[in-house]
Image: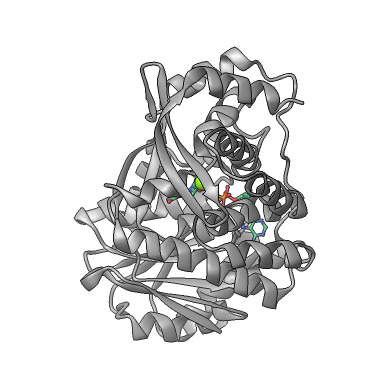
């Protein structure tokens, strides 16, 4: 079992990472002040619930918790106001009150949705994250919760920190390999922005990680969460440092939008985006080795490093112009200057970006 703390003063909380935590969740709930008198609501999705929901429900009930649960359709479309409204109805019917907790059992979709329910129901109730994807090591730490609007992703949201994050490594065994690799993209990203030796470790252990070796996964998630926690502790509400977490995301978000959400998974899109950022780094004078190691680390995790050639450069540029990071003819990018170190460049010429998008197709 590994444990670390997200240090946010009175909003600090622990992250527990280990095998079999679902079967001992009640002990953690009690330790962190989750009430047995008020009903708690587990939110899960249609892929995760058949695998793990019953185990968790029965365990918690057996330990004296009052439990109700709600299962949403798997997929990004559940991060909507309509689904939120259904969850609120369910919470009211089940009698959730101000002392109740909402528990997210699933990937980032469930975490963001259940988190926003917890942030808004009765102006905020306790929230527990039980992430079941590798990607969710990123989404479950940091307190950003949201649903989407048809016109924009994550646009209706809040900052709402959980009481704890319970990462049961056993749940990861059922993840499809593509989801495993997509999640590793954010793990590698946390190394690339912060910790050179962790990037080396990822390259060495990429095989074990993709084979879901519990020990390797536990360490990778511990390190990934540590970086995220360190950044968030310094900048809880994204006024500065937190921007470095966007490495690869400017191009990545544009690719997701142009390819159509779903064709490229988020991690795949940001993998290509991180290659683009490393190419930008070269133009700002970073040594070739920074690009080479970036590429090697992503490739070793089975991630794509090239853009599907059929994607239209104009459409990608256009999608980036809707990105918050675009200003006039200059763009803002997180750029690797060494392995484990990035800088925010706010004067990136749009032409460079266009050239790099073209290069990414070759
Ligand atoms: P996801 O929740 O959709 O999970 C991916 C797929 O894996 C889904 O089909 C899901 O049903 C399935 N799944 C989940 N756990 C499983 C398991 N253990 N076994 C088998 N199948 C399982 O997606 P994700 O990649 O975890 O998260 C993406 C979401 O996270 C996006 O909505 C994104 O906006 C959000 N996000 C939020 C933050 C944040 O800071 N709040 C950060 C990054 C991403
Ligand atoms: Mg991301």
Q: Quadrant of the C terminus?
A: top right
Residue displayed at 60% across by 59% down: 133
Would you identify the image quadrant in which residue 167 lies?
bottom right
- Compared across the picture, whether 251 is left or right of 242 comes to right
- Pick whichever, 335 or 5, lies toward us: 335
Q: Quadrant of the N terminus?
A: bottom right
User: Is 334 rendered above or below residue 182?
Assistant: above
Could you tell me if residue 302 is visible in this image?
Answer: yes
Residue displayed at 42% across by 82% down: 28
Give x and y (percent) for residue 106: 54, 58
Give x and y (percent) for residue 203: 72, 61
- Compared across the picture, whether 281 is left or right of 176 comes to left
Count of numbered tags: 0
Give x and y (percent) for residue 87: 39, 49
User: Is 84 rendered above or below residue 45?
Assistant: above
Give x and y (percent) for residue 262: 64, 35
Residue displayed at 35% across by 57% down: 143
User: Is 91 rendered above or below residue 280?
Assistant: below
| Colour scheme employed for the rendering of this structure | one colour
- Compared across the picture, whether 307 is left or right of 109 comes to right
User: Is 356 rendered above or below residue 109?
Assistant: above
Q: Residue extending furthest top?
A: 314
Could you tell me if residue 161 is visible in this image?
Answer: no
- Pick whichever, 179 or 353, lies toward us: 353
- Compared across the picture, whether 310 is left or right of 191 comes to right
């Amino acid at each position: 079992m590994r444990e670390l703390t997200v240090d946010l003063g009175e909003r600090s909380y622990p992250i527990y990472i280990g095998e079999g935590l679902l079967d001992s969740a009640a002990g953690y709930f009690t330790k962190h002040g989750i009430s047995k008198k008020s009903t708690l609501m587990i939110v899960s999705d249609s892929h995760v619930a058949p695998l793990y929901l019953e185990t968790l429900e029965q365990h918690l009930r057996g330990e004296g918790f009052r439990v109700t649960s709600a299962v949403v359709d798997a997929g990004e479309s559940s991060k909507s106001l309509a689904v939120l409204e259904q969850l609120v109805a369910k919470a009211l019917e089940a009698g959730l009150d101000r002392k109740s907790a909402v528990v997210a059992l699933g990937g980032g979709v469930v975490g963001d949705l259940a988190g926003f329910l917890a942030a808004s129901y009765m102006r905020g109730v306790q929230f527990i994250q039980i992430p079941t994807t590798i990607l969710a090591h990123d989404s479950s730490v940091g307190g950003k919760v949201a649903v989407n609007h048809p016109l924009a992703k994550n646009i209706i949201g809040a900052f709402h920190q959980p009481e704890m994050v319970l990462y049961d490594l056993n749940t990861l065994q059922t993840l499809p390999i593509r989801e495993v690799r997509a999640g590793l993209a954010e793990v590698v990203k946390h190394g690339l922005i912060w910790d050179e030796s962790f990037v080396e470790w990822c390259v060495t252990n990429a095989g074990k990680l993709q084979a879901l070796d519990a020990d390797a996964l536990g360490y990778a998630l511990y390190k990934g969460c540590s970086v995220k926690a360190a950044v968030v502790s310094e900048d809880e509400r994204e006024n500065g440092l937190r921007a470095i977490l966007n490495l690869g995301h400017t191009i990545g978000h544009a690719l997701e939008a142009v390819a159509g959400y779903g064709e490229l998974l988020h991690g795949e899109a940001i993998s290509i985006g991180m290659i683009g950022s490393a190419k930008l780094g070269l133009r700002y004078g970073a040594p070739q080795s920074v690009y080479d190691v970036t590429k090697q680390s992503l490739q070793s995790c089975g991630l794509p490093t090239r853009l599907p050639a059929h994607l239209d450069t104009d459409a990608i540029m256009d999608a980036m112009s809707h990105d918050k990071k675009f200003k006039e003819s200059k763009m803002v990018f997180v750029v690797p200057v060494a392995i484990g170190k990035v800088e925010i460049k706010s004067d990136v010429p749009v032409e460079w970006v266009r050239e790099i998008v073209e290069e990414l197709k070759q």
